[in-house]
Amino acid sequence: MTSSESGTTPRTSAAPKKPRATKASTTPKASRTSTKASKAAPEESKAPKTSSASRASSAPKAPKIPKGESHLALVRRARRINRELAEVYPYAHPELDFRNPFELLVATVLSAQTTDLRVNQTTPALFAAYPTPEDMAAAVPEEMEELIRPTGFFRAKTRSLLGLSAALRDDFGGEVPGRLEDLVKLPGVGRKTANVVLGNAFGVPGITVDTHFGRLVRRWKWTDEEDPVKVEAVIADIFPKSEWTMLSHRVIFHGRRICHARKPACGACPIAPLCPSYGEGETDPEKARKLLKYEMGGYPGQRLSPPADFPGKPAPALGAA
């Protein structure tokens, strides 16, 4: 971000001091107005009386991130993005419906290679039939396959669910363990699934490196690592442990709603002034707004039973119009 110090009028004349109200987007970062500047894009996109031309002309430019950026500078930049995302998504949450650790574990296993929405539409019938690990471990495979068929890869997922349920029954007294080293031993459970369960069912901080998270942290130049375990290690070094779970939710929320893989809505992005990849997607504010998804675009979310503070609409049940 550039400084506006060079444009400040020297205090040499006797004329009354005039308020500076013209270049809010270029005030020094110590000023609170820098936060407002970083949100110029979404505020402009929401103003119905502002012309498209004027909005496009004020679109932010990508900051120049030096190749030799120090670790300290990277940490400061990354944490500022996290703070901005916290203001945009104060309601960020896991987008799988669950009532206990077992349901979250099963739902997370089912979420591989499909959407959370499809999982949420499928699990009510599944948990009605098999509410406990003991019940699920005793399930007839073919019957379970039919229940989870909408999530895809239903045969492999059935084997995983039968295996992890039997392990919970036999090795953990029918309870989901609250330690990562125990969770990753369960069939079909890796570090990503384990961190989801730990962070959201047990309150143990964890970083969830799914496809959205990995894509965005590379787009923001936080890391160039591709391996999820290495990505997790890098991000864990940037943020305090207390932020890990909510950081994961915020980044994933942003990736699903605004910063899409193929065509990010750059012109409607609230952190555009902080993004080194600004311009990879649609920069026109009006066109970008049409790319927004879920509650950002006025559509239902992925959960059939979202948290009370969710500003969007609940998702429809399976088969609903």
Image (tube, rainbow, N blue to C red):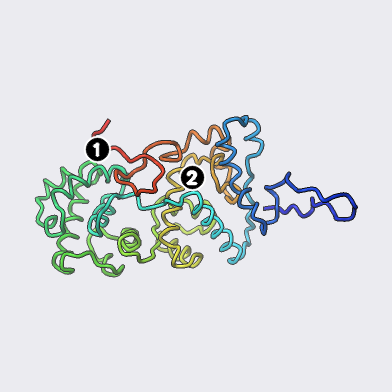
Q: Residues within 10 Å of mark 1 (few under 14, many from 20)?
A: some
Type of amino acid under label 2: Cys
Q: Nearer the viewer, mark 1 or mark 2?
A: 1
Query: x%, y% of residue 239?
Result: 49, 65
- Residue 166: x percent and y percent? 14, 62
Q: What residue do we see at 75% from left, 48% from top?
A: 20
Q: Position of residue 23 (x, y in %)?
A: 72, 46
Mark 1 is on which residue type?
Leu
SS under mark 1: loop
Calculate the distance from the C-alpha at mark 1 to the C-alpha at mark 2. 27 Å
Relative horizontal placement of residue 67, taking residue 203 as reference (left or right): right
Which quadrant holds residue 317?
top left
Outermost residue, front side:
16
Horizontal side of residue 266 vs 106, given as left or right: right
Is 12 on the left or on the right of 37, as rendered? Answer: right
Residue identified by numbered label 1:
318
Residue 13 in the figure: left or right of residue 82: right
Identify whether 209 is placed above or below 118. below
